[in-house]
Image: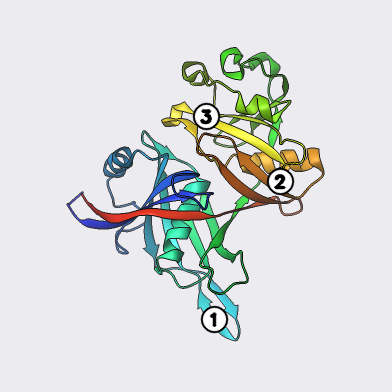
Amino acid sequence: MPKRAFRYAVVDAFTDEPFKGNPAAVCLLEDDAGAAGDHVDERWMQAVAAEFNTPITAFLVRSGAGADAAGGGVTAVTPQFRIRWFTPVRESELCGHGTLAAAHYLISSGLVERDAIEFVAKSGRLTAKKVVGSKDASDAKFFVELDFPVIPVVKYNSAEVFSLPDTLNGASVINELQAISAFSDLIVEVSSCDEVENVCPNIAELAQCPGRGIAITGPAREGSSYDFVTRFFSPKYGINEDPVCASVHCSLAPYWGQKLGKYDMTAFMASPRSGTLCLQWDEETQRVRIRGEAITVMVGTLHA
């Protein structure tokens, strides 16, 4: 990879406060660099991700393609970017908070002038759109809404259940599930919000579990503005605790939606940084819309 200068930003996703939520580095490569790194050395991208050492680094390349969208008698082209995500130790198949961070940076910096963006990843096409949360025209704050497919879950095979006594710290397990996807996340439902918060992660223990990571989830406190609470651990991906994992909510939204009889929910990630996700589960189309705020905390130029 020849030395070039690329602009980057560090964005905290699923929060409106700096140094909360989940940080992601967003690197904008040249428009002519090919398919989001198809012609960029993967070892270079992995080295950059390790240098940033955030839970995810998203690499973007603007594409000449885009979907035509008619509106107001004018045909507009939705901006399209090819995207790849890298943790500090490996490439990720899908990353919600990295996609939200990328969309927030592109919109807030004026790099795109539309309210919708299409991202093309190895795993398929994803859309993100700007949603204004206030009627006050002077309020620059906005949400980004992601449209992801549902990832169904099944009852975990009792013959293969991994015991997590140290990590669960005495929590009462209600259910153990497995996400049916390339991730194969293990989802453990416990009986209370307190038990989620009291999880004491034994990283060596968690690293032995199959799949990408382990979500510990439970109901929110009565009277809370949240519907359920989760923590997510992914030591295999170099992230001992993911501050806010959006992609696991592709499974959690339909799971909790069925339990609670709801299609619109608010989820809380109870990591030390914490984060809030607004969810809309569409049972008919089998889609999950994930909405959150973000804030850019750093911008600069990468010389590498």
Residue 235 percent across, percent down from the top left:
46, 27
Mark 3 or mark 2: whose residue is earlier in sequence: 2
Residue that appears at 50% across and 35% down: 242
- The residue wearing badge 2 is 225
Residue 127 percent across, percent down from the top left:
55, 59
Residue 162 percent across, percent down from the top left:
60, 16
Q: How far apart are the two marked residues, 3 and 2, measured between alpha carbons? A: 24 Å
Q: How far apart are the two marked residues, 1 and 2, measured between alpha carbons? A: 41 Å
Left or right of residue 84: residue 125 = right
Q: Is residue 171 visible?
A: yes
Q: Is residue 184 visible?
A: no
- The residue wearing badge 1 is 75
Tell me the amino acid under the disc marked 1: Thr
Using the image, determine if residue 51 lies above or below residue 288.
Answer: above
Q: How far apart are the two marked residues, 3 and 1, measured between alpha carbons? A: 44 Å
Tell me the amino acid under the disc marked 3: Phe
Query: Pointer 3 and pointer 1: residues touching (CB < 8 Å)?
Result: no
Using the image, determine if residue 258 lies above or below residue 164.
Answer: below
Q: How crowded is the residue under tag 2: few (<14 C-alpha within 10 Å), some, or many (20+)? A: few
Dot 2 lies on which element?
loop
Instruction: Name the colouring of the figure.
Output: rainbow
User: Which of the pair 108/180 is nearer the observer?
Assistant: 108
Dot 1 lies on which element?
strand
**Which numbered disc, 3 or 2, marks the residue closer to the eye?**
2
- The residue wearing badge 3 is 233
Q: How crowded is the residue under tag 1: few (<14 C-alpha within 10 Å), some, or many (20+)? A: few
**Which numbered disc, 1 or 2, marks the residue closer to the eye?**
2
Residue that appears at 66% across and 40% down: 251
Dot 3 lies on which element?
strand
Residue 13 percent across, percent down from the top left:
49, 49
**Which numbered disc, 3 or 1, marks the residue closer to the eye?**
3
